[in-house]
Amino acid sequence: MRENFSQENIEENNDEKIAKSVQSGKVELFGVLIEKYEGKIKRYGRKFLADSEDINDIVQDIFLKAYENIKSFDTKRKFSTWLYRIAHNEFINALKKKKNFLPLFDLDTFLPSALWDKTLEQNTDLKETAPFIDFCLDNLAPKYREPVILHYFEDLSYQEVSDVLEVPVSTVGIRIKRAKEKMKKICEKLEYKL
């Protein structure tokens, strides 16, 4: 009977249930959330900052803030959205402290290496298009770039992107649509120059 209970708990464990357990005193379970999201938050941070040492420090601060404020997390909502909102605020604050900062966009940063390798095996043309995608993303205004990154590379829904950026869902859709249009124009200009 205990075996079934344990298996049931493992299958039902999701971020919100883990967060609820942390809220009720099982603080050691917060490590499960860190393990799950640390790589994702670092990858997200590379969109803001080039220095990996800065990113690592800020990611530690993000998880510290999340831990300190876990009691305020509403477990009826998505933990990932709540965490990305904290990360967004921390990275924006770090940007404000930097001078002459140009955000970096590297496709390798946003696609997990296993997926990237698999994609390259299936589509050798991607090797040629990756620099174009990089360049196009790099030339988008941040208000267009961030929704694209969150939706396409971090796999957040429009609603989740809306929650992270604190803008209406319709605004997310409009910004992503405009970002695609702008990226297309940038790529077209590049083709003429080549």
Image (cartoon, rainbow, N blue to C red):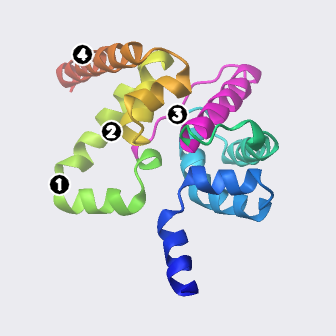
Disc number placed over residue 185 in the picture, else none: 4
Q: Say whether disc 1 or disc 4 marks the residue closer to the N-terminus.
A: 1
Label 1 residue SS: loop
CB within 8 Å, label 4 to label 3: no
Q: Amino acid at mark 2?
A: Pro
Tell me the quarter of the image containing the N terminus: bottom right
* Location of mark 1 (residue): 123
The picture quadrant where one finds residue 2 is bottom right
Label 2 residue SS: helix
* Location of mark 2 (residue): 131
Q: Amino acid at mark 4?
A: Lys
Label 3 residue SS: loop
Read off the magenta span. 79-107
Residue 27 relative to residue 42: left or right = right
CB within 8 Å, label 1 to label 4: no
Q: Nearer the viewer, mark 2 or mark 1?
A: 1
* Location of mark 3 (residue): 104
Mark 2 residue crowding within 10 angstroms, few (<14) / some (14–19) / many (20+): few
77 is higher (above) or lower (below) than 172: below
Residue 107 relative to residue 185: left or right = right
Q: Say whether disc 2 or disc 1 marks the residue closer to the N-terminus.
A: 1
Q: Residue at x 53, y 57 (%)?
A: 14
Residue 65: x percent and y percent? Answer: 78, 40
Q: Is residue 184 shown to the viewer in this render? A: yes
141 is higher (above) or lower (below) than 163: above
How far apart are the alpha carbons under marks 1 and 3? 25 Å
